[in-house]
């Protein structure tokens, strides 16, 4: 079992460029269960990861938007709707968009009983425009999306311009992305945080919030194997505490970048 899982992880990493294609995610949604369709292999690690992601996002929302109840939020690269459902739980009027038709179908099916209903639709942030009017949303959110959907910095800048178009002038763009320039950690787009900030500046955005999550040594060690939850939880928490209290931001797998429109 461990050997099979390790080989599967190696295959995934050797095919990272495929992650920019909808077909890859269609296949993944159809061949895996639960959060493993869009996050990590390990269910116990996903439980800790999801909880931490929402803590980081909620903190950013409070800082940038205040109370998001009743606000219109777009979840870009929504996958099977994991984050979109959490946004609705927090009281937002959430919409999800993803380039994988299988993921959108799964998200729609799994949220059918939710009230108010959540709208999910197919759209590719790397091939704008998305099917929404200018300034349709109080905030646009992308979690683990742009680093996969964008193949180069020109594509990233184009995607950021589209997020800026969709976001109200008083609103915010919130990214929580695996931003790395190294071959080991980079996803499809391998670029530094400085590269991302320069692309955002060219897209007319101003950085107003930044933090990290996902202590890399622990993420690499635990995300692929189904260790007991009682083991994962305290170790994961210790890694996050280290990121918060020590100068270790370079060891964060995901970077939270919050932007507003720049007025020039």
Image: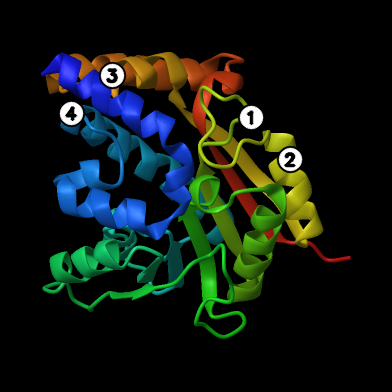
**For residue 137, above or below residue 204:** below
Q: Residue at x 79, y 53 (%)?
A: 201
Regarding mark 3 in the picture, which secondary structure is present there?
helix
Q: Residue at x 68, y 63 (%)?
A: 158
Q: Residue at x 51, y 37 (%)?
A: 187
Q: In whole angstroms, how far apart are the C-alphas of marks 2 and 3?
A: 29 Å
In the picture, which quadrant includes the C terminus?
bottom right
Label 2, residues with CA under 10 Å away: few <14, some 14-19, many ≥20: some
The residue identified by callout 1 is: 181
Q: Nearer the viewer, residue 99 or 197?
A: 99
Judge from the rendering whether residue 6 lies leftward or rightward of residue 179; answer left or right: left
The answer to whether the residues at label 2 and label 1 have Cβ atoms under 8 Å apart is yes
The residue identified by callout 2 is: 195
The residue identified by callout 3 is: 222
The residue identified by callout 4 is: 44
Q: Nearer the viewer, residue 262 or 37?
A: 37
Q: Residue at x 57, y 68 (%)?
A: 127
Q: State the image quarter where residue 194 is shown.
A: top right
**For residue 219, above or below residue 130:** above
Regarding mark 2 in the picture, which secondary structure is present there?
helix
* Residue 215 pos. (x, y %): 44, 21
Q: In whole angstroms, how far apart are the C-alphas of marks 2 and 4?
A: 33 Å
Residue 238 shows in the view: yes
* Residue 196 pos. (x, y %): 69, 44
Mark 1 or 4: the one toward you? 1
Mark 2 or 1: the one toward you? 1
* Residue 108 pos. (x, y %): 21, 71
Label 3, residues with CA under 10 Å away: few <14, some 14-19, many ≥20: many
């Amino acid at each position: 079992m461990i050997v099979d899982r390790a080989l599967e992880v190696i295959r995934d990493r050797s095919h990272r460029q495929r992650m920019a294609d909808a077909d890859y995610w269609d296949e993944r949604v159809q061949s895996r269960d639960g959060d493993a369709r869009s996050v990590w292999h390990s269910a116990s690690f996903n439980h800790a990861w999801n909880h931490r992601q929402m803590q980081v996002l909620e903190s950013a929302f409070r800082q940038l938007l205040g109370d998001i109840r009743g606000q219109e939020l777009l979840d870009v690269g929504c996958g099977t709707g994991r984050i979109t459902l959490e946004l609705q739980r927090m009281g937002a009027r959430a919409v999800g968009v993803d380039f994988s038709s299988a993921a959108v179908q799964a998200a729609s099916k799994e949220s059918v009983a939710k009230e108010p209903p959540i709208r999910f639709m197919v759209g590719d942030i790397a091939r704008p425009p998305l099917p929404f009017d200018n300034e349709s949303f109080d905030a646009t959110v992308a979690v683990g999306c742009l680093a996969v959907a964008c193949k180069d910095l020109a594509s990233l800048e184009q995607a950021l311009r589209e997020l800026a178009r969709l976001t109200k002038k008083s609103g915010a763009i919130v990214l929580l992305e695996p931003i790395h320039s190294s071959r080991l950690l980079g996803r499809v787009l391998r670029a530094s945080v400085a590269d991302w900030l320069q692309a955002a500046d060219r897209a007319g955005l101003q950085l107003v919030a930044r933090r990290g999550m996902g202590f890399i040594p622990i993420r690499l060690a635990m995300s692929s194997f189904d260790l007991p939850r009682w083991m994962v939880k305290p170790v994961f928490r210790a890694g996050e505490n280290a990121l918060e209290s020590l100068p270790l931001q370079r060891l964060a797998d995901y970077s939270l970048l919050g932007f507003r429109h720049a007025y020039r």
